Image: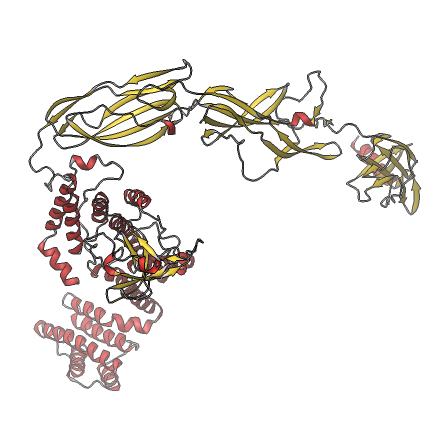
Amino acid sequence: MARGMSIAILAALLMIGAVAQPSVRVVVDSTTVATGEPFAVRVTASGERVSRPVIPHVEDLVINRTPSGTSQSMQIQFINGRAVTNQVHEWVYYATAKREGAITLPPISVRIDGKDYFSEEIQLTAQEPAPPQVVTPPPAPGRPQRGAAPSTPDGQKEITWDDVVLVECTVDKRRAYQGEPIQLTLSIWELQYWGLTIRYTGPRSFDMPKSEGFYALPPEQRRRVASRNRFDYEVQEFTQRLYPMRAGMLDISTWSWQGMATVMAQFGPKTHSYRLTTQPVTIEVLPLPASPPGFTGAVGRFRVQAQVSARDTEQGVPVELLLRVSGEGNPDAIGAPQLPALSWAHVSGQLSQVEPDPAGAAGFTKVFRYTLSPHEIGEHAIPPIPFCYFDPASERYRTEETRPIALRVAPPREGVYASADHPAAPQYRADIEEDIWSVKPVAGRLRIRGGSVALPTTVVVSPPLLWGGFFLFMRRRRRLLTDPEYARKYYARSRGHKRLARVAASPEPVEELYRALIEFLADACNVNAAGLTSEDVRGLLEGRGLRDEAAENLVKILRACERDRYAAAKLSPAEMDALTRAAVSCVDRLEEALLKGRAS
Amino acid sequence: MNAAWMLLLLLGVDSFARTFEQANDAYARQAYAEAAQGYESLIAESIEDSVVFFNLGNAYYKLDRLGCAIANYERALRLDPGMTDARENLTRTLLKTRRKLNAPAPAPWARNLFFWHYDISHDATRVLAAACWTLFWALLAVRLWRKLPYLHGAIIAAGVLALAFGGSAWVKAHPAQRAVIAVEHVALRYGPGEQEEVVLYTPEDGGRKAPADLFDGDRVRVEARRDGWVRVATSDGARGWAPENALVFVTPPYNRPPEDAGAIANTEEAST
């Protein structure tokens, strides 16, 4: 069975070589085309050696002679038992009709296997293009698509350019009292659709609509997704709080959005430019009714709270009174509430600051700080502090009051301010004065001008000095590792001392002493220690100009050792001890002498 | 100087702390002149502390000596650029001055080279310079011991930083002399002396040619000093000589402000 299959495959392969009949075919997307809109012309040629098509010149058509796409494939067909190979080439050209009416696309020639082959001519009908609003870019099958498939309410998949970008300007009320907050919202709706790109091409600085006669807070921006006419949009919203400053009819001007939308259609991208303008908005601003005494300009709805920094204080020690006004309205229009007169304390000026609503809502808290300096001892109370505002919802003035606050003022402690043990005296804690930040205590010692130069000098000089020491250390270390002669001389003395220290404990002290001295000298002079005798040592030392007592003593010690080794004259322990001590002295002096000699 | 400093340490600086607390106490009693006197005595005793300058600025502010207050807030900020209280009080005081004249800008080379160091205190630059200097030598020592990747780059970076912070510390230690007018009005003259004519100049921001009048709180750059007179320049292009006792110097050596804040010179003769 397997053998039969192999023969069949071999036969099939042998028969490859037969080639299909060459052919050229041209197709267009549609024989009815719109003037000015590109359409694709596909040229397909099959054969073994296929050249590029020759695109003829057509008076009524603009044909891009550079193919926007090419493809190549190979087919193997079995025709009447013969395997037939077929190279198939395809080129895609884009053409545009210049005029309306019948246009003939003449035959296109392709050279296949050395011969020219021609396609059939094609009759085209060019028409006026469809209205530009209509775009029909069906989503590519299987491609990701954001949101639901866009469709018109009648169910057709059709989007007009007008649906792509929308701009709106809205206000939450058209009639308001002077100072009442108005929310202005500017919305830019951008259609969510695959292949659609929307680009802002307007001025770089983004300005909200002009609103003369209004006090405007800085705008805030947010994004959300919303549906409109069954399409999905990404909405960019700019909200701004406006406070009308005068009564009458106030206008919020038009606002323009300039941009460009590009959609990937079947035959290339399509672009549309926009300049969208919102309608102007007119607000009727009503004047405030005659205000009661104590009204400082707050319009909206507010709450008021009071608190003190301490309930117990001392005579002359100020406490801070915080008055918090929370609500919605123009914080800059709220004046400081007038405190009731306090006979027992002096009230100094106020300082205010605005805190945004921690919940992120449109509300705020304006904090007024007063400094109360009690000058009467006893139990006192801060009476309710009234806060008057106009409530647009009920269209009348309202007055909120704080709760009374009890305060106990004790007699002052003796010398509390002058005491160095009391650095954080209470008057320093209430650190806001009428209009400037108050004096401070000093933490630690007062600084003296100039100061010592020792520390900076040490800081500047120490690192290079330490580095210099480290450099010398590393250089010596490297030399000891790389220069054996230097290393032998460097360690000669310490090694000699170590060996001499072992002499007494050695079973053969004379031999140990002899070897210690010979090796010391060999190391110090960088010679081979093997075979050195006392006479060699004398010659060595004389050769280096050492003829002093230490050299003589060394030779004598070596001779004494040699006598002990080769003659019957054995050294007694006492003699041995004396020789060892003399050897230690010799080693030190010879080392010095050798160093001196090296230096000279 | 060094010996004097050591002597002060040995004698104990607690007397300074006592004087400081007494001055703060006087301030709390609203005896601002007494408080200012106390702080000034500390400065005369070589105390150079940003808090002392700040408190002295407050005392002068309360005495309505705006120029003296501005000079002392400037002194505090020179020592501690991060002292926001001093910055806010300075701003508030400057708003009360007649001309609200800008401070003279540093020299262009200093502005271009040290654009980054104006918000860093002198102490911080010194510490950073010392740290980078030590790091530079430590990295050089590491290089002797072992070759590590990126070591060359780190050495160069540490060296450059040490140079930058060292240069910054040096510039801060040798600042351009600045001063603040501490009298109600003074007219700049072409030379050091009352007999010299009053300078006429055209402000850089346009306007007509006018006598170079300086007022309480105007900040100036000191260019030269001679015989009790100081040649100063303002940010709007006026340059001339003013009597030294009409100024409070922001940079050392510190001087006491004039006792009388009244006019020292006027421009009537120039105007006529």
Q: Considering only vertical position in the picture, is A110 above or below A403?
A: below
Question: Could you say which quadrant of the image residue B223 lies in?
Answer: bottom left
Coloring scheme used: secondary structure
| Residue B103 located left or right of residue A43 | left
- Between B271 and B136, which is closer to the camera in this rendering? B271
Instruction: Tell me residue A62's x, y (percent).
Output: 84, 41
- Between B176 and A581, which is closer to the camera in this rendering? B176
Q: Quadrant of the N terminus of chain A?
A: top right
Question: Could you say which quadrant of the image residue A148 lies in?
Answer: top right
- Between A414 and A62, which is closer to the camera in this rendering? A414
Q: Quadrant of the C terminus of chain A?
A: bottom left
- Between A373 and B137, which is closer to the camera in this rendering? A373
Q: Could you tell me if residue B224 is visible in this image?
A: yes
The residue that appears at 26% across and 59% down in the rendered structure is: A459
Instruction: Tell me residue A194's x, y (percent).
Output: 65, 29
Residue that lies at the very extreme toward the left in this rendered image:
A414
Instruction: Tell me residue B214's x, y (percent).
Output: 32, 54
The residue that appears at 14% across and 46% down in the rendered structure is: B34
The residue that appears at 13% across and 59% down in the rendered structure is: B6
| Residue B163 located left or right of residue A465 | right
Instruction: Tell me residue B161's x, y (percent).
Output: 37, 57
| Residue A141 located left or right of residue A360 | right
Q: Tag count in the figure? A: 0
Question: Could you say which quadrant of the image residue A92 lies in?
Answer: top right
